[in-house]
DNA sequence: TTGAAAGCGCTAACAT
DNA sequence: ATGTTAGCGCTTTCAA
């Protein structure tokens, strides 16, 4: 690792000029086979690896794409962890059942999959991926840092303040993921929350006839939650019913809030169908219903949204709508890659289809 | 986004030299407040973001750390996905229950957490993270690419062939994650597989007395699987018993193989305790036992390894050993960061403690 | 087919 | 406190 070899070292050893070394690496055919061999030999003898920085500077492009997430981990107060001095630590610790860290976790899983999709597509397109997580760091230095190092940036909706984003967009293309497109001129990749929810609601309505409906809503300020409500409401209206008849209980997307909401419903009278704005809340509600002896789907239909793993394992398995997370990541890279070669094209708005997964919780036995 | 502003542009606009601009950004105190303001004004007016490439070249360090994973996704044959031309695609698709993609998935979750830990710690240490996934790409160009762009590289054990790794290590520090340290001189971060398994085995032994033991092993060529067996065997021997009395059935870490192994056991006589080399196999076995009317933990104790989420949700909940995945990522970054400032120090071998999670499946009712 | 040389945008001496 | 200048390691004309 001494001091990394450079083109000059390789050129010396091969007895050629640095230009030739560069050519061998970038357009091998432009150089005579014998020379090429000499150079390649020198390259491996020296363990030469080209400097990305120098390349980036000369080429005026880095070959790197940035992916920037909102940070859901309370990073600041993560315990300090010091591996280096803890040589004598015990090799294990014993715990009597771990607290179920089920809640909150899911937004991260979402991000993981987006990341995987992005990495996959980046690789296919010949880019590497740089990732950053937004933390409430006063001057947003991380995303700025990234912006200086990448050819294009993908940001999750509302992980970067508008003004910062606007500034970065002056330097490199930006694509916004998964939020509702606002009046900006960035490229967007998103999903049809409302339409899918409407379809699912139709499916429910078809079974409950004029039974009583309940909607388990998310926090008021969640754009996703809002879209889901709108889809639901649209389907209800289309069916010739009034949304005023719908019992709306509000939660905050956590399982606990779902439980509380369900308890309210149980107290005030069980509806015929409960449509929840996300899976966690629906699962919490299922818990309560089971505890109260209310049978799903016989007495009550329940549906969720997100398609988290736990939804498939619940009793009964939960009908839900799955976000195409991998594809979101892939799509973002595609949009970005295309933007990189045609800077002036009109802003793109790519909408990905959602998957409505019908399971037992929404299928009234016939 | 026109043409990105450079130090020169900023210097011009602020009426100073480029050196002053650079100073304002790197050591603000070295410049008179009025000048500083002028420069900062110019910076925001122009939307200036420093070029990472130029910086990296001049500073001879990039501030980027690389994380390289083995690729478990069959990337090559992922469906092509073309968002850009599918403007008229339907906004959703309906599926009757999705096939449970439970198996195989888990290694990726593992990686996701490592990644999160690495990102967190990288941020704390002032680095950004670049991620790459190993695919069977003939010349390993991805990892090479990364090596040229980062200050240090973290690789998951055996995701990079030895010779390639050796070469990269000549250029930048390398730390190897989670594999058994071999006779190399890289820094390593790993866990005490064997010791933890031994402890868990002791816990089991204490309950079963001289009951019959069975071990559900992983593939023969898995280093992890081997270490786990060794820990188990050591505890058995220490207890004054012979490993020859242990019924060993072999699986391949998948749930299906766990099921098959359990069927063998059921056919040949149910043991008093089954220690499995991973959770998936243990869960598969639980399925079979339940189906066969064998009660866990009353008739038979069962334990797993890995601490996947599903282990907490099984019936009964599965005792397991949880890998400190987040900490693995964090530790890797710490080791790397330290190496970056003292290149010549001796290779580090950091061992992280595992968490033994005792649940119902291993607690004989009293 | 190869070499010489001019940048790419920045940092860090060294001068002033 | 600020400016001048020499690189950092590479790509890419332009000549030979």
Image: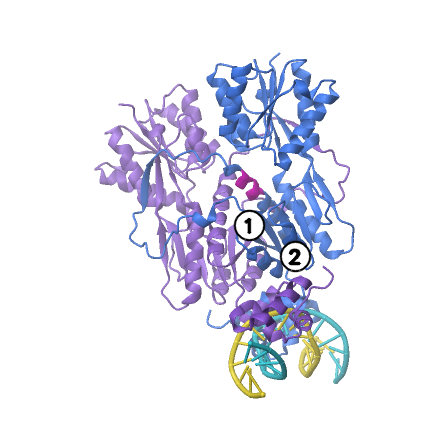
Chain colours: A purple, B blue, C cyan, D yellow
Location of mark 1 (residue): B134
Q: Residue at x 61, y 41 (%)?
A: B326
Look at the picture and state if A50 lies above or below A107. Answer: below
Look at the picture and state if D15 lies above or below A220. Answer: below
Q: Is residue D1 left or right of residue B106?
A: right
Corner quadrant of residue C6: bottom right
Q: Residues within 10 Å of mark 1 (few under 14, many from 20)?
A: many
Alpha carbons under labels 1 and 2: distance apart: 15 Å
In the picture, the quarter occupied by the N terminus of chain A is bottom right
- The chain letter for the residue carrying disc 1 is B
Look at the picture and state if A54 lies above or below B89. Answer: below
Range shown magenta: B107-113
Q: Position of residue A22 (x, y in %)?
A: 58, 71
Q: Position of residue A132 (x, y in %)?
A: 55, 53
Q: Are marks 1 and 2 in contact (CB under 8 Å)?
A: no
Location of mark 2 (residue): B168
Q: Which sits in the foreground, A61 or B360?
A: A61
Q: Position of residue B134 (x, y in %)?
A: 55, 50
Mark 1 falls on what kind of element? strand
Corner quadrant of residue A184: bottom left
- The chain letter for the residue carrying disc 2 is B
Q: Position of residue B129 (x, y in %)?
A: 59, 54
Mark 2 falls on what kind of element? helix
Picture mark count: 2
Q: Which sits in the foreground, B156 or A174?
A: B156
């Amino acid at each position: 690792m001494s001091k990394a070899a450079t083109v000059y070292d390789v050129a010396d050893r091969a007895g050629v000029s640095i230009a030739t070394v560069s050519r061998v690496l970038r357009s091998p055919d432009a150089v005579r086979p014998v020379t090429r061999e000499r150079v390649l030999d020198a390259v491996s003898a020296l363990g030469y690896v080209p400097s990305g920085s120098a390349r980036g500077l000369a080429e005026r492009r880095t070959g790197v794409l940035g992916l920037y997430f909102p940070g859901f981990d309370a990073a600041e107060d993560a315990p300090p962890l010091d591996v280096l001095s803890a040589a004598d630590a015990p090799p294990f610790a014993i715990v009597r059942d771990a607290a179920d860290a089920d809640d909150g976790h899911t937004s991260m899983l979402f991000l993981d999959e987006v990341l995987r999709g992005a990495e996959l597509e980046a690789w296919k397109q010949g880019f590497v991926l740089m990732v950053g997580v937004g933390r409430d760091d006063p001057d947003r230095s991380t995303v700025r840092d990234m912006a200086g190092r990448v050819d294009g940036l993908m940001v999750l909706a509302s992980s970067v303040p508008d003004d910062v984003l606007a500034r970065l967009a002056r330097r490199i293309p930006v694509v916004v993921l998964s939020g509702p497109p606002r009046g900006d001129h960035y490229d967007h990749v998103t999903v049809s929350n409302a339409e899918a929810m409407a379809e699912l609601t139709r499916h429910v309505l078809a079974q409950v006839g004029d039974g009583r409906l309940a909607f388990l809503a998310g926090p008021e300020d969640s754009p996703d939650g809002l879209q889901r409500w709108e889809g639901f409401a649209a389907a209800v209206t289309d069916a010739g019913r009034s949304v005023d008849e719908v019992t709306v209980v509000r939660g905050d997307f956590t399982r606990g809030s779902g439980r509380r909401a369900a308890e309210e419903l149980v107290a005030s009278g069980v509806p015929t169908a409960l449509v929840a704005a996300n899976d966690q809340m629906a699962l919490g509600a299922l818990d309560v219903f089971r505890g109260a002896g209310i049978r799903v789907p016989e007495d009550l239909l329940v549906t969720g949204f997100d398609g988290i793993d736990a939804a498939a394992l619940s009793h009964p398995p939960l009908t839900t709508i799955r976000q195409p997370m991998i594809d979101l990541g892939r799509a973002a890279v595609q949009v970005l890659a295309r933007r990189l070669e045609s800077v002036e094209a009109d802003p793109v708005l790519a909408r990905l289809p959602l998957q409505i997964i019908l399971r037992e919780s929404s299928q009234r036995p016939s």
